[in-house]
Each structure stands twice: as structure tokens, then as C-alpha cells.
Image: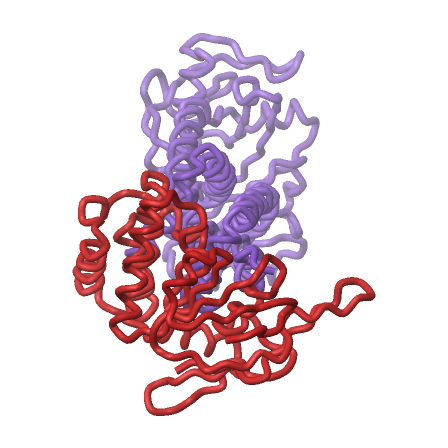
Amino acid sequence: MLEAIHLTKRFHQGEIDVVAVDRFSHRFQPGITAVVGPSGSGKTTLLNLLAGFDTPTEGEVRVQDGEKAVVLSKLDEGRRAELRLRLMGFVFQQWNLIPTLTALENVAFPMMLAGHRLKERQERAAALLAQVGLEKRVKHLPNRLSGGEQQRVAIARSLALDPPILFADEPTGNLDSASGERVMELITSQARKGRTVILVTHDLELARRADCVLRLRDGRLVDG
Amino acid sequence: MEVLALVYRNLRARPVRSLLTLLGIVVATASMVLFMSFGEGLRKALGAELSSVGPALLVLPEGVEAFSAGYPELRPEVVERLEALAGELGVTKVIPSAVFVRGGFDPTSSFAFQGLPQGVSPKDLYPNLEGAEGVVTPGKGGAVVGGTIAERNKLGLGKTLRLSPEVSLEVVGVLERAGGIADSVIYVPIEAIHAVLGTKNYTSVLLSIRDDRRAEEVAAAIEARIPGVDAQTAGDVLRFAERAVRISDLVRFGISLVALLVGGLLVANTVMMSVYERIREFGLMRAIGARRRFIFGLVLLEALLLGLVGGLLGLLLGQVASFAVNWYTVREVGLALSSVTPRLAFFALLVALVLGLLAGVLPARTASRIPVVEALGRV
């Protein structure tokens, strides 16, 4: 479960107060929830708040951690990082992978942070890469992979610790349509397995596959 | 595994920069090892030197340090008093000696003459010396030349040594090399030194005693009975020498600190640049769930690795330089001046590691403190 309650984020730009997210409230359910809106509508800021990259000016983000609900936005940086590691997976538009690690090591990275054993990490990372169809690319560094392959490695990595929540920020933004289609299929299949997927996009075509669509304009939820 | 791969591959990804940085630490560590090795070499040489000295006590004018070769200040009366006290104190031999050093900038043009009384041979001072050619004891008008200096300056039997325009001596004996400073001395009759310096004074008086274990006691008695002299046992000399070497250790470490500082700044600069280039990477790691201290450790490890590898290579280079120095000094003065002892090696590695650690702290702090949204470029 992920819930935003009266989430507000204000920035000071010189003399002007900019409200990037304005009293946003929503309870995210398993399945795909698409957040759409033109650029500057506050999509990225909203994702930053929901994932705990940033803290809101007002309101709060709640996340279910096992039996108990935790107010993510009230925790310190270290605790937020720890919850992100266990409960959330991320696929960004670009800069998804650590450039000096192989595909396998990238996928194994969150498991290393979580303290899993080397053998276990390697086996699971290899299995996840096979699941996204990259079993022959495990030892490749990111710069030897195509954009679509890199996104698939990112998806495999986001599943490494089997998190209930998946954030996908313009995951097909830089891809050709065939690669984009492949990536979306993988994301959709994860949503069908009961994960809560938050898909941030300005592509309305992509948003059509979502179970729920949230439209943002000037930081406000228009309908949803 | 991933962490080590990250650190290693990141350094390898920018090979020229990493190599140049490494070179900075290598040179800094090597220069420190070489500088400090002189102290260790001196300690070893002094220990060896003193253990091959025959007489147990050295009497010097008060306030003059051992091994100094200044103008002779011990008056003949002091020698007479020592001879008078000999029986009572258990002194078996009283050997007054005067030293005259003619220095040059180059070791090949520097000469040390030690004047010995009639009938005293260099073997009385350094028991392990042996004659190679001619006689061992310098007689009237004759000089006996140490093995190293004889070879270096081609001083064979029959050669003439001019100590001053008025005083010339003929080489009447050449000694075998025994390894040590005694090989670099020319032994002459004491009258020759007195004539050159225009004095009847002595530089020092060497005493042999019946029971070496009583050296301290005899030294104290001499100092109490004869005003204006210091009587030093071999142990005193060693302690003094150790203190002098320790002071020079500090001076040499101070000098090498400059090189170390430059090496440290190089590491800090490299790691800082690498941090700025990898901000997004750190942002991504933190987005995935890495804590600040993980990033801090990662960057610090990189600096430490540079310090460790640079330190090891620097130690190796220092060792090579030390060999080269010894090759030269053994040939010229018969002494291995430089020595890379295990404790010096350990100290050098420790310094290189601390250098890496200190140089890594600021970049590591910077890397771990950038807000996630900024690092990810998601502001």
C-alpha cells in the first residue's frame, strides 16, 4: 500500500514561491497507476515525494511495511533509503545502470546492499536476467547494451528484492517502439502479479494500459 | 564483490589519471623511504662500528660530542693524569690520539688522519683490522692507510702523502678492508698531526680497562678526578648517537612530509574529480537504497586503494634507490648508509594508507551528502 495525503511541495525560485505539487491525495492500489500530464505539471516532483527522494512541505506519504503502516515522509534519510531498498523498485528513463558494473552485477547490487550472500545474489540475478530475456548478456557492461536492453536490466534489478511497489518514470521514453513494447509488457506482467506500479509518463498511449490514470496540471490532481 | 569491482573498475576506467596519481604517491613514498633509510643505515653502521672498537672508554673534552673532529682540546696534562691514575682504576692502556680531517666536497678528496703515539697500531683501536702490505704500525715518517681509502685514491706502498707544506709522510703499510669507518682512515704518527696543527693537544684519549663490566664505574671516577673531561663508555656513545640519529630522523621526515603532502593532494584531487563525474551514479545508488555511509565508504576505499598500491610501489622504488645509494657509498667510504628495515617498510605503508584515508575523507563526505534529487538530476 502506498498513500499520499494532502501532499504539497513548494520551492522558492528567487522571490517567487512555486507550488510544484498541490494538496495531492491518492491511495495507490495494486496494478498500474499512470500519472500523466504535460511537462512542468509536477509529475517528477510527485514521484520524488512518493519514493522518499525528497520530503514534502506539507502532507505525508504512507507506506505499508509488513504489518504496519509507516509515514515515509517523516523518516530520516537513512530509514527512507532502507525502506526504498526493501519495498520499492525503480526504472528511470535514463541513467538507470551503474556504468562500471556488468548487467549481472547491476541486478545483484540491491541484494548486496541488503546483505545477501554472493552465490545467492549471482543465482537470482542470472534468473532475473533470463526472465527479461538477457541470459546471454549477463557479463556485458551497460555501454555494450542497447537502450532497450538497459531498460530490461533495470527492470530485472527493480525485482531483485521482490518489492511490492514499482516506480517507472518514462520507462520507454528513449526507446524505439519495438523495444518500448517489450519493456511495457514486462512492466504490465509485474502489475498482474499484484505489484503496485506507478507509471509516470506524458505518453497518453502508454497511459491507456493503466488500471487507473491520474492527470496532473500545475501540481494538482485534475481527475483520477 | 560488487564493491571491489566498482572501486577497481572506476580507477581503471580512467587509466591515465589513476596512473599519474599513483605515480605521485609512489614518488612521495619512495622519497620518504629513502630519506628515512639513511637513519636506519646509520644506526646499523654505528652499532657495527662500536662493536669493533677495542678500547672500552673514550675520554673527550667536556661538552664535545663523540665523532666530532674539531681542533684538539685535550691538554697533555690530562693524559699524564690519566696515566697516573691507570693502576688505581684498572686501566691497562692509555692511547691519546689526535684527528685531522682535510675535507672536500667530494668523498674522494676528503681525508681523515688519525695520529697515534709511538708503538700504537690501528689494531689496538680496531681489533679486526689486518695488514695487507708493509707494516701495520705507523713509524716515524710513515703512514698506514685503511683498505678503502688505499684502493680509492690508489695509495700504495712508497707513495708520499702531503699533510701540509712542511709535513710529508710515506705510505709504509696498507690495511685489509674490514668493513667500517676504520677502512677510510689514514693512521699516522701523532707528531705529524701536532706539527700540522701547531699544538701538543689531543682530540681524545682511548682507554682499555681490565674489566669491561666496570666501564661505567671507571668513567664516573675519571670524571670526578679530572676536571674538564667527559669519559664515555661505548654505551654512552651509542645512546648519544641514537639521539642524534633520532633528531635527524625527524628532520628527514619533515622534509619528506612535503612530498607526502603533494601526494595526498593529488589523491584528493583525483578522487574529488571522480566524485563530481559520478554524481548521477551515486544518486542512482541512493535511489535504489544505498545509505550515505555506503557511498562514503565506497569513495574512501578508492582513495585507500590508491594509497595502498602507491605505498607498495613506492616502498619497492625506495628499496631500489636504497640499493643504488649503498652501491655508491660502500664503494666510496666502505659504509652501507641506507637500510630499509622491516619497521621502516611498515611505517611507510602506514603513512601511505593514512595519506589515502585523509585524502579520501573530503571527497567521500561530498559524495555522500549530495541530496538524492540533485544527484539524480531530478530537481
Residue A199 seen in the current view? yes
**In this figure, what is the number of numbered marks?**
0
Residue B151 point in image, percent of width and height: 40, 16
Tell which of B72 and A61 is nearer to you.
A61
Chain A rendering hue: red
Q: Is B324 on the left-hand or right-hand side of B251? A: left
Q: Quadrant of the N terminus of chain B?
A: bottom left
Residue A20 point in image, percent of width and height: 65, 68
Residue at x 46%, y 21% (from the top left corner): B139
Residue furthest bottom in the image: A68
Chain B rendering hue: purple
Whether residue A195 is situated above or below residue B70 in the rendered picture:
below
Residue B232 seen in the current view? no
Tell which of B236 and A158 is nearer to you.
A158
Q: Is B243 on the left-hand or right-hand side of B91? A: right
Looking at the picture, the colour scheme in use is by chain
Q: Quadrant of the C terminus of chain B?
A: bottom right
Tell which of B83 and B10 is nearer to you.
B10
Q: Is B73 on the left-hand or right-hand side of B356? A: right
Tell which of B103 and A125 is nearer to you.
A125
Residue B278 point in image, percent of width and height: 50, 50
Residue at x 37%, y 24% (from the top left corner): B136
Residue A166 point in image, percent of width and height: 37, 68
Whether residue A53 is situated above or below residue A182 in the rendered picture:
below
Residue at x 49%, y 24% (from the top left corner): B186
